[in-house]
Amino acid sequence: MKFFIDTANLDQIKEAQELGVLDGVTTNPSLMAKEGITGKDNILKHYVDICNIVDGDVSAEVVATDFEGMVREGEELAELHEQIVVKVPMIKDGVKALKYFSDKGIRTNCTLVFSPGQALLAAKAGATYVSPFLGRLDDISTDGLNLISEIRLIYDNYGFETQILAASIRHTMHVIDCAKIGADVMTGPLSSIDGLLKHPLTDIGLAKFLEDYAKGNS
Ligand code: E4P
């Protein structure tokens, strides 16, 4: 399972990278705005800054909603750095753009996916990653994890190579549940990765080991 961090915050990306388990980064226009990154030139530079911190894939989202605009933006983003994956929304022109990029060998992440049918279309169009937003489904009392299971089943039935990127992860249990279901990738906040570390018996056990060591060596 690949671990991506879902942020445009460079300090958090560095912290996750230093832990040694980071496989990539996802961003979106809202995450960029949250870090105060505005204006096309600043946004493009920020993508390159992120690529220079991590070794893996960095999703950069188009903001055009028409086919020609998405192609123009996506090609510019892909030119920025070899780690860039072009993030395209699940709309009609987005599906056309996914197919166009796939034919050109440009890697893509189909975003804003909320149904198995949308995920099937993304795979048919040759998306590298599909991003079902499980947290946002949970937010409206719909089972987000069930969507991940349904997509896993459909992709396995036909051997689709599109990777399931469980997105909109809210907490550590989402990460564990997605791992059980067989999501290829998860993207979440740093806290969802840090949470995997924690167990009180680890802390109690370590304190006891150190205490006994100190007794024997004092
Ligand atoms: C996916 O790539 C999105 O950036 C992200 O996971 C959305 O998550 P949110 O629902 O927490 O905004």
Image (spheres, rainbow, N blue to C red):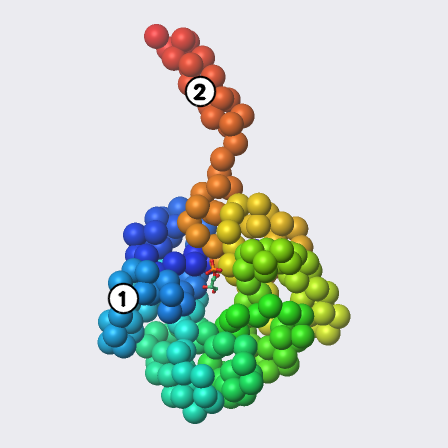
Residue 97: x and y in percent read 50, 86
Badges 1 and 2: C-beta atoms under 8 Å apart? no
The residue to which callout 1 is attached is: 37
Frontmost residue, 48 versus 42: 42
Residue 126 in picture, x, y percent from top left: 58, 80
Percent across and percent down for residue 133 are 55, 63
Alpha carbon of mark 1 to alpha carbon of mark 2: how far? 43 Å
Q: Is residue 197 above or below residue 149?
A: above
Which residue, given by chain and number where applicable, does mark 2 sit on?
207
Circle 2 — which element? helix
Above or below residue 105? Residue 10 is above
Q: Is residue 91 left or right of residue 207?
A: right
Of mark 1 and mark 2, the one earlier in the sequence is: 1
Quick check: is the Cβ at mark 1 less than 8 Å away from ligand 1? Answer: no
Q: Is residue 196 visible?
A: yes
Tell me the element at label 1.
loop
Which residue occupies 32% across, 65% down?
33
To which quarter of the image does residue 49 belong?
bottom left
- Amino acid carrying label 1: it is Ile
Tell me what residue is drawn at x 44 percent, y 76 percent.
86
Q: Residue furthest front?
A: 140
Please state if 18 lies on the left or on the right of 132 as rendered: left
